[in-house]
Amino acid sequence: MVSLICALEKKPNILFIAIDDLRPELGCYGSPIAKSPNLDKLAREGRRFDRAYCQQSICSPSRASLMTGARPDKIGVIENTAYFRDLNPNIVTLPQHFIINGYEAVYCGKIYHGRMTDDAHSWSRKPALNRCPVKRINLPGGYARTENQNLWARNKEAMLARYGQKGSGGLIHGPAYESADVPDHAYADGYSTQLAIATLKAHLEEKPKQPLFLALGFKKPHLNFVAPQKYWEMYDRDKIILADQTDGPDSGAATGLHASFELRTRHGIPKKGEIGPELSKTLLHGYYACVSYVDAQIGLMLDALDEAGIRDNTVIVVWGDHGWHLGEMGIWGKATDYEIATRVPLIVSTPQMKAKGRKTDALVELIDIY
């Protein structure tokens, strides 16, 4: 990236797109089911990495590692509660490096994990909330359907009564999936996209000569699998294929397997035992719907670059923070050491890329992005 920036007369803008819990389940990666036309097109215009891997198959360590260019064991972030800045107060993050080199840096959506947003160091401006054409909708529990909001509220009350505010942690959930007839911006990812587009326009008006590092983070297809109904309708349930390898590998590492702990906390999911074929098909349907929902938002963001006339001077990087088991080895979730949880999608498009549309089997890691 440094050589690319030096080669251009004008420093390029950076569109940095993070997608939560997305394994390489895209059309451009050979998925026979996933509908991802915008990411497929971007792959044809850039470079697709077929052997890209995260540093750890869980959110915070993976993201902290990528954003600092350091491995989880080096920065001391190996689970979801440690904040890399507390442990490494002087470390320079990727957007911080761009700020030092004359960029404006801003994020919309999920880039770091949870509340560890590193606002004081990694970002130089706030999103243009006052310019966003849509208002953020408060959805209790993240659900648009009233019945699911009520289920979430009852579960929250029960968990708080049982464990208290601190002990309830990741146990407060409603159903694992939802299809609702709502606009894209009703859910967080649609709103984040509209906010990012508004922020891009505001920056170009206010500081047209300053290059921009714009990070856009999507929460889906992370559980819960909630997406507007139109994305569910893109799929024929009868054509959804269940995983055929539902047992752990013979003589495989038992410590790499788990009981789908993240999914089990959701309402309507058996707390132990098999996830049956009908429920499995519904969960897959929800995951695919979320993939297409995020893909549509990325399409809107790329259109905004074209409309602003800056696509030819913008580096685009799309990455997933880790993979996800969709019933393979009997697991629903991340946090294993197997390839299906550690391999991620990575697509890069640059203005001066000559051999567009090619894939590479080169072995790369997410820390290589920095």
Image (cartoon, rainbow, N blue to C red):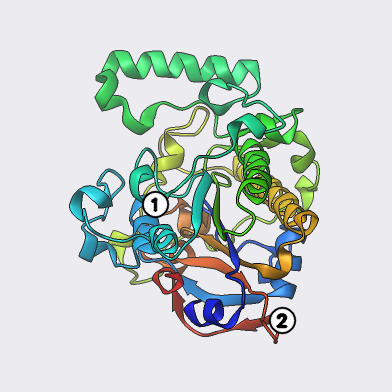
The kind of secondary structure element at disc 1 is helix
Q: Is residue 358 above or below residue 242?
A: below
Residue 72, numbered label: none
The image position of residue 248, as x and y in percent, is: 41, 63
Q: Quadrant of residue 53?
A: bottom left
Look at the numbered discs 1 and 2 and tell me whether their residues touch, using CB distance below 8 Å: no
Which label's residue is closer to the chain start, 1 or 2? 1
Residue drawn at x 48%, y 15% as measured from the top left = 153
Secondary structure, mark 2, is loop
Looking at the image, residue 357 lies above or below residue 144: below
Circle 2 packing at 10 Å, graded few (<14), some (14-19), many (20+), is some
Image point (54%, 76%), residue name: 5
Say which quadrant the C terminus sits in.
Answer: bottom left
Mark 1 Cα shell of 10 Å, populated few (<14), some (14-19), many (≥20):
many
From what the image shows, is residue 151 above or below residue 59? above
**Residue where numbered disc 1 is placed:** 122
Q: In this rendering, does residue 112 appear at all?
A: yes
The count of marks equals: 2
Which residue has dot 2 on it?
Answer: 356
Looking at the picture, which amino acid does disc 2 mark? Answer: Lys
- Which residue corresponds to the image point at 76% horizontal and 55% vertical from the top-left? 308
Q: Is residue 278 visible?
A: no
Look at label 1 and name its amino acid: Ser
Q: Nearer the viewer, mark 1 or mark 2?
A: 1
Q: Viewed as shown, does residue 102 lie left or right of 24?
A: left
Image location of residue 361, percent across then percent down: 55, 84
- Measured Cα–Cα span from mark 1 to mark 2: 31 Å
